Image: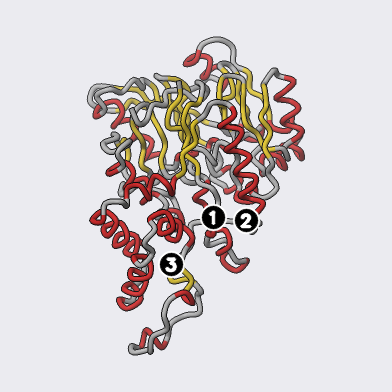
């Protein structure tokens, strides 16, 4: 079974990561906003931090697999390789036919499949391509934008392009054009990889409305929580619920909880403000507790029933998970501390087994509070990887939980 995830907290057995690569060195101050970054991480240290993260997981019995390696294994078939490169060039948005051919030829000439995949992730600077004489008006008027193909610097946040739900995945339509091409790797893995081909897709990257994995939390086998956020549309959540309830033979999900969070970059996904860390404990950013509306989606007579919950968040979670629920506030509820540590993903933890989580070292106030609540912490360095605005949960996509 390639995918099996029916909990946020059950012991993690296998996880997908992407080690930051040359795509981070294609960030420049001028194009940070376009590429959804606020700063430029130092690649060498970002890789050391990411390696420390992977080592924590391995030391705790988790098998780590890498996105570029899975994609490269698919490319062993020459026909699939040609199809992939053709599609990748098309999705790069290159309008000039001569430029398209130059880009295709450049990528296709990289014979090592891992190196080829990594180059498609890193982006392609125009100065890497052979110089040709300007022939058309468009050639003469070419702008000074440095890239023939944009880099994908957000790829080390493997949580977002797809999400494991039960034994299937949501292959996501991403919110921004910048990240939309990231899902091409998952598409080829789930269509062609020997371990994952045939995996059921609950959503598709070609759908109309956006949904991202950071908004999807599998609370237990019967309950899914999804954030209505800056990047996940309410329409996409309702469609996902309909697919699970009516079109998925082995579905166990009975309730989808849609949590409406503020539509800002600081709170871009549900998991940046809310993660489960034990059977009865969650981290939460205190500033979302007031404005949070929750809707309960259940299976009706040929349709999805939608009901607005009137209970508190603790009561809603207790209703579906059983027992008393404790919400542990990022920064202990102090406004300044919680704002600072939430910006650095103090609420974004990766649970590797009940009551045991991976956290960033820089969120020391929240970490101390978690320890006082009886949570075991695996602390990772975070000076550079945190600059991408994502935490340990963002950087990991569980493939199998016990």
Which of 332/125 is in front? 125
Q: Looking at the image, is mark 2 or mark 3 nearer the viewer?
A: 2
The answer for how far apart the CA atoms under marks 1 and 3 are is 16 Å
Is residue 193 found left or right of 258 in the rendered image? left
Name the quarter where the C terminus is drawn.
top left
Residue 116 position, x and y percent, is: 40, 59
Is residue 85 found left or right of 283 in the rendered image? left
Which of pointers 2 and 3 lies earlier in the amino acid sequence? 2
Q: Quadrant of residue 379?
A: top right
Q: Residue at x 53, y 15 (%)?
A: 318
Q: Which residue is mark 2?
A: 43
Q: Residue at x 48, y 57 (%)?
A: 152
- Considering only vertical position in the picture, is 298 above or below 214? above
Dot 1 and dot 3 residues touching (CB under 8 Å): no
Which of pointers 1 and 3 lies earlier in the amino acid sequence? 1
Q: Looking at the image, is mark 1 or mark 3 nearer the viewer?
A: 1
- Considering only vertical position in the picture, is 28 above or below 382? below
The answer for how far apart the CA atoms under marks 1 and 2 are is 7 Å
Q: Residue at x 58, y 26 (%)?
A: 60
Is residue 351 found left or right of 86 in the rendered image? right
Which of 288/166 is in front? 166
Dot 1 and dot 2 residues touching (CB under 8 Å): yes
Q: Secondary structure at mark 2?
A: helix
- Considering only vertical position in the picture, is 365 above or below 80? above
Other residues around mark 1 within 10 Å, as few (<14) / some (14–19) / many (≥20): many
Q: Quadrant of residue 162?
A: top left
Q: Is any atom of residue 72 visible in this view?
A: yes
Q: Which residue is mark 1?
A: 21
Dot 2 and dot 3 residues touching (CB under 8 Å): no
Name the quarter where the N terminus is drawn.
top left
Other residues around mark 2 within 10 Å, as few (<14) / some (14–19) / many (≥20): some
Q: Which residue is mark 3?
A: 149
């Amino acid at each position: 079974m390639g995918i099996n995830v029916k909990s946020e907290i059950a012991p993690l057995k296998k996880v997908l990561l992407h080690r930051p690569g040359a795509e981070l060195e294609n960030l420049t101050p001028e194009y940070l906003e376009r590429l959804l970054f606020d700063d430029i991480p130092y690649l060498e240290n970002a890789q050391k931090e990411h390696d420390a993260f992977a080592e924590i997981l391995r030391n705790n019995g988790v098998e780590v697999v890498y996105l570029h390696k899975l994609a490269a294994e698919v490319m062993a078939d020459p026909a699939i390789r040609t199809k992939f490169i053709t599609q990748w060039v098309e999705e790069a948005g290159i309008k000039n036919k001569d430029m398209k051919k130059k880009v295709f030829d450049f990528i296709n000439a990289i014979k090592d499949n891992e190196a080829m995949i990594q180059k498609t992730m890193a982006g392609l600077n125009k100065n890497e391509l052979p110089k040709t004489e300007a022939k058309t008006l468009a050639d003469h008027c070419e702008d000074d934008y440095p890239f023939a193909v944009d880099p994908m610097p957000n790829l080390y946040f493997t949580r977002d392009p797809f999400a494991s739900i039960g034994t299937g995945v949501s292959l996501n339509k991403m919110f921004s054009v910048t990240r939309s091409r990231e899902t091409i790797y998952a598409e080829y893995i789930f269509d062609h990889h020997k371990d994952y081909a045939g995996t059921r897709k609950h959503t598709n990257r070609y759908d109309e409305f956006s949904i991202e994995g950071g908004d999807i939390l599998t609370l237990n086998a019967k309950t899914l929580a999804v954030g209505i956020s800056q990047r996940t549309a309410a329409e996409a959540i309702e469609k996902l619920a309909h697919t699970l309830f009516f079109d998925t033979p082995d579905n166990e999900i009975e309730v989808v909880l849609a949590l409406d969070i503020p539509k800002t970059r600081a709170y871009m996904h549900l998991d940046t403000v809310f993660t489960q860390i034990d059977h009865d404990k969650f981290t939460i950013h205190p500033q979302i507790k007031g404005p949070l509306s929750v809707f309960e989606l259940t299976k009706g007579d040929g349709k999805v029933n939608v009901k607005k919950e009137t209970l508190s968040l603790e009561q809603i979670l207790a209703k579906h998970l059983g027992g008393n629920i404790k919400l542990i506030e990022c920064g202990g509820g102090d406004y300044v501390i919680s704002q600072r540590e939430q910006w650095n993903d103090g609420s974004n933890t990766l649970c590797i087994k009940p009551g045991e989580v991976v956290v960033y070292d820089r969120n020391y106030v929240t970490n101390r509070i978690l320890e006082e609540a009886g949570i075991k912490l695996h602390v990772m360095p975070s000076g550079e990887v945190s600059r991408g605005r994502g935490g340990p949960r963002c950087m990991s996509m569980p493939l199998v939980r016990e």
